[in-house]
Image: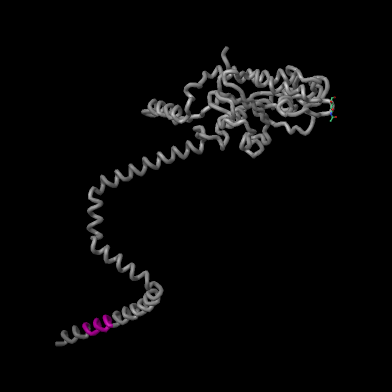
Amino acid sequence: MEAPRPFAPDWYVPWLPPAPGADLKLWLCELWLLLLTPGLSADLLPHEEDVKFINEYVNLHNELRSKVKPAGANLRFMTWDVALSRTARAWGKKCVFERNTHLEEINMAHPIFNGIGENMWVGLENEFTASIAIRSWFAEKDRYYFGNGTCRGDCSKYLQLVWDKSYKVGCAVTPCSRVGRIKHAAIFICNYAPGATLRRQPYQQGVVCSQCSKNDRCTDFLCSNAEREEATYYHFWYPRWEVPRPLVCDPICILTFFLRTLIFILSVTIVLIVQSHFPNILLEEQMTFPLEVTKREVEEEEGEEEEEEESEEEEKSEEVEEEEEEEEEEEEEEEEEDEDEEDEDEDKED
Ligand SMILES: *[C@@H]1O[C@H](CO)[C@@H](O)[C@H](O)[C@H]1NC(C)=O
């Protein structure tokens, strides 16, 4: 028997327009991905098998929801959501049988919905099928009394599975070397939006589809609405707490990469141009600022720093003195000129 194997992660790897060496870059990036994600190569599935897996768990959810007893009047038709799958995969990677702690945090489990629901199944890896896991949740119905809304023990997974308002589901199965005491385990998580609050009965009892929202149609005994169910692919969203982080490059990241490359090329070009125009630029610098002078300047600067306040005042007075001196000099020059003229006059007379 062939058990459904884990999801191939939906890496998003952006590519700049093809350039020389693009093939090499592509190859290097693929190698990088394989090195970064141990075991990925072994579990990497063809895309069609992903679709099979998605169809299997979504269809089973809808089938079980349409069969609730007593009959439900307002249960919604469920469709797949990629962000919920990513959250399920990211939490599954931790290999712990614990509730995801990020479900109520804004933007941490889904880019749009808050208050995400979660069901979890842990078992032997070679015994896992989506059907076994989801039916085990549904089996909790035997402990639930719809009439007075009470449960013997835990019915939370059943209540989430048949919660009327939930219409998006995303699941992922992750192999784990061990979870608690189970070795060679598989952890199967489904996340739901909007999540169940569990504070009331899971749906309204009544004739199938008799209490759907306005504009809903009845599809397979469930309330369906094409607009509501439209798939969004959230190309650049992934859970921020995922470890290791998947390789995702959003438009800002692409822009930054592009600008950095551009600036690097520009600076290299400028250096090359300057070097070709001034081949002796380093020698020239040494000629204009010989070592000895620079040393003296440094020493002077150090001295100045210590007496900065004093020297400022001194400078002011010096400036005033200089101005006075200049004025005096000018006057003297004028006088001299006058004298010269007089002398010339005298000479002529002679
Ligand atoms: C709810 O109903 C079930 C069966 O009808 C009964 O066994 C159970 O005691 C009820 N619980 C409460 C809290 O009334």
Q: Going 58% across and 24% down the picture, which residue do you hit?
A: 186
Does residue 96 lie above or below 139 as drawn?
A: below
Image quadrant where residue 309 sits: bottom left
41, 113: nearer the viewer: 41
Image quarter in which the C terminus is found = bottom left
Q: The magenta stretch spans which residues? A: 332-340
Q: Is residue 108 visible?
A: yes
Of residues 159 and 32, which is closer to you in this image? 159
Q: Position of residue 34 (x, y in %)?
A: 45, 27
Q: Is residue 309 left or right of residue 335?
A: right
Could you tell me residue 64's position as x and y percent?
72, 19
| Dominant SS in magenta | helix
Q: Nearer the viewer, residue 170 or 300?
A: 170
Point out residue 266 in the picture as x, y percentages from the top left corner.
37, 42
Ligand 1, image quadrant it occupies: top right
Q: Quadrant of the N terminus?
A: top right
Residue 336, image quadrant: bottom left
Q: Position of residue 281 (x, y in %)?
A: 25, 51
Q: In the displayed structure, does residue 292 sit left or right of residue 140?
A: left
